[in-house]
Image (tube, coloured by chain):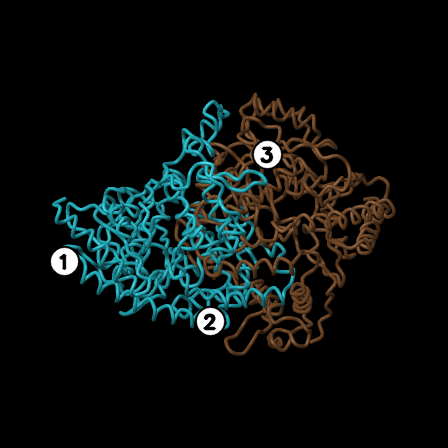
Chain colours: A cyan, B brown
Amino acid sequence: MRIPLDRQDSVPLYEQVQDYLRRHIVSGQLAPNTRLPATRKLAKELGVSRITIQNAYANLESEGLIANREGSGAYVLPPVQMATAVTDSPSHQWPLWQQALAATGSEQPASSPTLPPHPDIISFTGVGDPRHFPVKDFQKSLQAVLRQEGSAVLEYGKLGAGYLPLRETVAHILASQGIQTYPPNVLITTGSQQALALICQVLLKPGDVILVEKPTYNLALNLFRVLGLEIVGVPVNEDGLIVEQLEPLLQRHHPRLLYTIPNFQNPSGVCLSGTRRRQLIALAERYNLPILEDDFVGDLRYNGRSQPAIKALDPRGHVVYVGTFSKILMPGLRLGYVVAEGPLFDRLVQLKQVTDLNTSPLIQQAVNDYVSVGRYQAHLRRSIRRYRQRRDAMLAALKQYLPPEVAVVAPQGGLFIWLRLPAPLSAVALRPLAAAAGVVYAPGSWFFPQADEGEAYLRLNFAVQTPDRIAEGVRRLGGVVWNEIASGK
Amino acid sequence: MRIPLDRQDSVPLYEQVQDYLRRHIVSGQLAPNTRLPATRKLAKELGVSRITIQNAYANLESEGLIANREGSGAYVLPPVQMATAVTDSPSHQWPLWQQALAATGSEQPASSPTLPPHPDIISFTGVGDPRHFPVKDFQKSLQAVLRQEGSAVLEYGKLGAGYLPLRETVAHILASQGIQTYPPNVLITTGSQQALALICQVLLKPGDVILVEKPTYNLALNLFRVLGLEIVGVPVNEDGLIVEQLEPLLQRHHPRLLYTIPNFQNPSGVCLSGTRRRQLIALAERYNLPILEDDFVGDLRYNGRSQPAIKALDPRGHVVYVGTFSKILMPGLRLGYVVAEGPLFDRLVQLKQVTDLNTSPLIQQAVNDYVSVGRYQAHLRRSIRRYRQRRDAMLAALKQYLPPEVAVVAPQGGLFIWLRLPAPLSAVALRPLAAAAGVVYAPGSWFFPQADEGEAYLRLNFAVQTPDRIAEGVRRLGGVVWNEIASGK
C-alpha cells in the first residue's frame, strides 16, 4: 500500500496515514472486509516506526471504521457496523443515576464538523513548530536525571507544591521578567490548564459569574462551561480588555473572578496597555475582585516595549499568575505553574494534592535540568528570531493576497494573527471551503462566550509553518475569500 | 562535611542529607550564619549528584532553616528568622476574598508531628521497593519512543481519553484478569488519585454522602474531605466490607457513591468475599447506587484464589473501575486509568480534558512500549516472588517479636499488614517512641473517617524492606510494644 507521506509537514505521520486510510474507507476505495496490511509490514514499506501505524489503526478503530480480529489483523468494517461498532445496543438500559447524568450534563462545547480532505493541508492551528522543539537536549536531561537519581525519581516524590529546585527556577525566570516572587509561592501544575482549573475550583462554584475577555482562549471557555460558571464577556480593543467598560459589569454581576490574558492575547494578539493594567488593579481593590492573569507567551515578544505583569503591580495579593513551559518548550510535557499568596495558595496546593498527588517528578526534574543550564533562554532566543520572521511573512502575505476589507491587527509577539472578514462573510461557513482549498484556521466562534458573536473572525497561527508555506497558505485563503466576495455572499 | 549516607536504605539520599543537616541546625551544632558548603563541592565530597544536594538545600530553605544569599551560597538562619522567613509579615492585610477563603477552608487533614531523628530508620511506609523499579528497561522505552516519534510525542497530543494503544493495552491486561472491556471505555488519568477525583467531581457535590470502608485509603479520605463530602464509614472484617450492614445506611443516608477497595484492601489487607461482591451488585441495583471499585494492587496475589472484580459482575454499568500502573511499576510516572461506560464515561472524559487537557503523551507512549513487550508481566512475576517472601518474613517476625495480644491478619497479597494493639495502647502515642527506636509505621488513625476510631491500629508495609531489615524493624517495634505493656499504660 503506497501512502504518500510528507515528512516536512507539521501534521504527524500517524495522522497522515490515518487520514489517507479514512478517505479510502469512507469513499469505498477500500471495500468492507478488506484486510489492512500488518502494522509491521506497512511500517517497513513506508519507512516509519511501527508505533506510527499502530496509532493510525487504533484511531480508525475508535472511529468505528476498522476492527481488529484476534490473531488475523485489522479489517475494514461494513458501513452498517461502522455506526454501531462503538456504541451500545439501543436496548441497553442504563441505571437511573446514569440517565440522570446524561440529562443534567453541562453544555457540551460544540464540536466542529469534519473538514473535507485535501492532499496537502497547510494548517494555521496548533501552538508552535514541533520540528524545533529541543527533543535531543531534553532527552539528554531525561537521561541525566535517570542516571543521577535512578529509581528515586520514579517514586511518588514529596507531595506538595512541586519539585523545589524547579520552583526556584520558575522564580528566577519570573524575576528576569520583573515579577518578584519566592519559591514557596510557586505551585507546579500539569500544564497551565490544570492551573486554571484549580483556581476556578477553589474560587468559584457552579452558577458564579466569571468575567472574561471577548474573545478569549477557547479551552478556558470550555473549562468554565463544564464547571457550570456563568460567563460574562468584556470586549477587547487594540489596547486589550476595555477596562473602561468593566465597572458597570462589576456592579451588576458581582463576578467572583476576572480571567485575562494581558500579553499577545489568545486569540486577538493584542496587549493590555500599562494604564489599563493599573486601572485593573485599582478596580480589583475597590470591588474585592481576584484577577487570574494567564501569561501564556509573555516572553515571545518580537518588537515594542513590554509592560509589567499585572502581578508585578499588585501589592495586596489580588492577582494569581499562571505561566507555562508548554509554548516555548514542549506542550506534551504538560508543565505549568501558578504564583499566588496567602490562603489562596494554601488551598490551591491542597486541591492539587488530593486531585492528582503531584505532577510527574521525572518530568519536573528533567525540565529543571534542561532549564537551569541556560538552554531555556537560548531556545527562547531562537524561537523569537524564527517566529518574528514568520509573523512578518504572514503579515506580508495577508497584505498581498487578502482583500483590503479584511481587518488585520499586527501583533507585537505571541503566536496569533486575528482577522475580521467584511460583512456578510462568515468564517464558520468559509472553513470547509478553505479546507477544500488546502488551508485550515481556527474560526472566531470558538473564542466567544456566545459563539455567533465570533462569526466574522478567524485566528491564524503564524508560528507553525515556514515562511514559504505561510505564503502559500495565505494565498489559498485569499483565493477563497475573494471568491466569496465576488459571488456576492 | 562528612555526612554518613546509607545507599542501601530506602530513604532517598537527598532526604538523608537533609535530615542530617536539619538535626545539626536545630540542635545548634551548625551555628546561625554558618555558610554551608557549595552544592558542587559537597556533592563531590559525598560522591552523590549535585541535584541531591540542591534538593536537600531547597527543602531546608522552604522549611525556613537556611537561606540562599545571591552569589554567596547558603547560610544557616538564626532561630528568630527561621520562624518568619517563609511567612508573611503579620501586618499584611489580605484582600477580603482571601480572608474569606481562609475562613471557609475545608477541614485540613491533620498533619503528623515531626518524628524524632534516628541514625538508621527502618520505614514500613511507602508503596513498593524503589530499588526494584525497572528503571533501565523503562529508560530504554523512553529512548525508543523519543527516537521513533521525535518531537511528535512532545506535542499536545490528541485531546481525549488518552493514547489509544495504551488504552488497548489496559483492556488486554484487564481481560487477562477477567474484566471484559473495550478501549473506548478506558480513560487514562494522572495516577489513580486523579481517577478518584474526577469520579467524585462528576458524581457528587459538597454535602453529598459517600460510603467508605472503615478503615480506608487515607489519600482518598483527604480527597473526600477537601471536596466537602459527608463521609460515612462501613466496618470491614476478614471478608472485607460488611455488606450486611449496608442496607440500613443506604436507607438512612441516600449516599451518592460507595468507595471500595475489594482486593488486599488498603490498609487492612483483606479481600471482599465472592458472596459479598454479588450482594453489593444487587444492592447497587436496588438502591440506584454507583460503586467506585479501586483495584490498586489486585494482581499482587501470593496465595489463595482470586475473586472476580465487582466490575466483572456488573451487567448494567453500576460499577466504575479504577486501576493504576503505579504500584507495580513506578509511582512517579503518575499513570492510572478508569473503566466506565455510558454518560458517566463521557462526563469523565470531558472533565479530564478541561482540567488538564491530557496526561503526558511521552509517559503514556513510553509505558505502552514497556508494557506491550511483555516486560510488565515479567516484572509483575518478579514482584510477586519478592513480595511474597517479604510478607512471610514479616509474619514470622511479628510472631517472634510481638506480644500475642497484638492481633495480626495475614493478607493473601498486596503490600500491607494491619495490626491491632491491645487496649489501652495507642498507635498514635507509640509512634514517636517507635521512631526513636528506629522504626516507622502508618498509624491507624490516618485511615478512619473519625481519626480516634483508629487509635489501636497500625499499618505495616512489608514490600519496601528486605527480609533482614523487616526482621530488625519488627524486633524494634516489638521492643517498644512490650515496654509499653510492661509499663502498664
Q: Amino acid at mark 3?
A: Gln
Question: Which residue shows up at 72% across the image and 40% down it?
Answer: B269
Q: Which mark is residue B124?
A: none
Look at mark 3 in the image and give the residue it sits on: B180
Q: Chain of mark 3?
A: B
Question: Which residue shows up at 58% across the image and 62% down it?
Answer: B63
Q: Residue A337, can we see it?
A: no
Q: Chain of mark 2?
A: A
> Where, by quadrant of the figure, is residue A449 drawn?
top left
Query: Pointer 2: residues within 10 angstroms few (<14), some, or many (20+)?
Result: some
Q: Determine whether, in the image, residue B99 is placed left or right of residue B76.
A: left
Q: Nearer the viewer, mark 1 or mark 2?
A: 1
Instruction: Tell which circle, 1 or 2, labels the residue nearer the N-terminal end.
Output: 2
Look at mark 2 in the image and give the residue it sits on: A375
Q: Are marks 3 and 1 on the same chain?
A: no
Horizontal and vertical percent position of residue A323: 41, 59
Q: Nearer the viewer, mark 3 or mark 2?
A: 3
Look at mark 1 in the image and give the residue it sits on: A404
Q: Determine whether, in the image, residue B61 is placed left or right of residue B445.
A: left
**Quadrant of the drawing holding the C terminus of chain B:** top right
Q: Amino acid at mark 1?
A: Pro
Question: Which residue shows up at 37% across the image and 44% down it?
Answer: A23
Q: Are marks 3 and 2 in contact (CB under 8 Å)?
A: no
- Between the residue at mark 3 and the residue at mark 1, the CA separation in whole angstroms equals 60 Å
Q: Determine whether, in the image, residue A300 is placed left or right of residue B167.
A: left
